[in-house]
Amino acid sequence: MPEASSASLRSAIEAALPDRPFALRFWDGGEVASTSPGPTLTFTSPEALGHVIRSPGELGLGRAYVHGLIEVDDLDGVIALLGRWQAPPLSAATKARIGSAALRAYGLRRLPGPPAAELQPGRKRHSRERDAEVVRHHYDVSNDFFKLFLDESMTYSCALWEDADTLEEAQRAKLDLICRKVELDSGMRMLDIGCGWGALGIHAAREYGASVLGITLSPPQADEANRRAREAGVGELCEFVVRDYRDLADDGFDAVASIGMVEHVGGSQADEYGRQVARVLRPGGKVLNHGIAWVPPTDQGFHIGGDFSERYVFPDGEVQNLSRMLLSLERAGLETLHVENLHNDYAETLRHWTARLEQNLEEATRIAGEERVRVWRLYLRAARNGFETGQTAVYQMLCSAPLTEPPSPAPTGRRHGEARRRVPA
């Protein structure tokens, strides 16, 4: 089959997009030049167009990129375009001309299927079975993969950079802030919802003497967390299990921490999540809900990720508005004590994660495969862009359960009094 020509497609793109802060290069040497400085996207094969023809827009381009059929000279530059460039409205006739030109450039061949890294889950959205499937798609890449870019404690959430110079220091500061906000002390019981690899639970047990139950939907996370707890000498105080938050039989916890988990809950389950948190908390107990929020208000109170994120990054992820997260906790009978936005801290955290992953690309590819690595290189940058442009934020919401009797005096030596950072009483 003779090599397909991109000439007619290039002409159609140039006519449709007179303002182009990016350049396009094609497999046959043709190019659509940029009209102002910007990144260059190279379509290395007509197969790249096949993905776009099958799924025009974000998903098709994402599939071609994950398959290695689109190369980008500046990923950060591409992500920056998302916040500052808007394509002009295209008429139906213009879209038809571009589509027809793309078909001619693609030639007579079968359209490609999606990459292996794509997930299209079955079952009802936010059922227990489907939630487990999509969570494991994101987290069960490999523990060794995450070790390549996380800090030593494997804390996979926003760090706190106020008085820190390294990622390790910033994550310890964040873990300590959480413990102080919920007023942990020796002998207290804490529930860690979405415990990850156990960093918070281990810190709470080692530094505060608390006993911790951590729950996750990822078996490799639970196994690694228990191993790390034993290695840290707090195995008797920490237990990490695979369990859905809706299936908790335990109650009477003095504190509940949910760090970076509420994004997986879903808008339809927000009130159920609030009820479960309130149910397991003893009277007067504290809950710290730490989650990413969608800043622009939405009618339904949450935002579903784009097609690419839904298939490759966080399937079924739904980022709620702050008001919706607070409402679910208030409806459950909890009182909001304090709200803090750490979006600048998360942007900095993502910069460090990105740099660490870039330093370990060869090993990351060996462990996770080229497709997954391409997804993560794009995802980490896109997430940072969201915080930098004000599209997303990350909030720590401190709440308490109502008291049924007058409170007793606080134990002496409680650590929250030692805080340099202001923490609500």
Image (cartoon, rainbow, N blue to C red):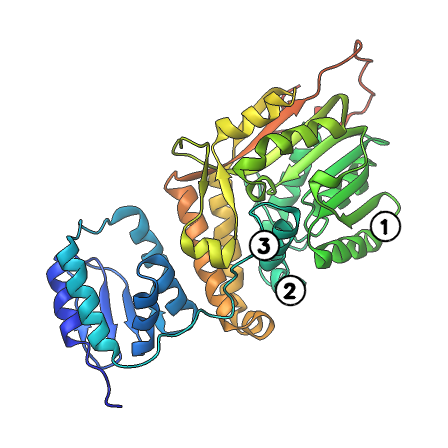
Residue 233's disc number? 1
Label 2 Cα crowd, 10 Å radius (few <14 / some 14-19 / many 20+):
some
Measured in 3D between alpha carbons, the distance from the residue under mark 2 to the one under mark 3, in whole angstroms, is: 15 Å
Identity, as a three-letter code, of the amino acid under mark 1: Gly
**Nearest to the observer: residue 74 or residue 371:** 371
Q: Are marks 2 and 3 in contact (CB under 8 Å)?
A: no
Viewed as shown, does residue 392 lie left or right of 261? left
**Nearest to the observer: residue 177 or residue 235:** 235
Measured in 3D between alpha carbons, the distance from the residue under mark 3 to the one under mark 1, in whole angstroms, is: 32 Å
Look at discs 3 and 1 and give the one toward the viewer: 3
Percent across and percent down for residue 100 are 18, 69
Q: Is the residue 406 above or below the residue 175 in the image? A: above
Q: Hey, which quadrant is residue 327 in on the image? A: top right
Going 78% across and 25% down the picture, which residue do you hit?
A: 414
Identity, as a three-letter code, of the amino acid under mark 3: Val
Numbered disc 3: secondary structure: helix
Percent across and percent down for residue 295 are 42, 34
Query: Disc 2 designates what residue?
Result: 142
Q: Is the residue 418 above or below the residue 224 in the image? A: above
Question: Most extreme residue toward the front, as rendered?
Answer: 123
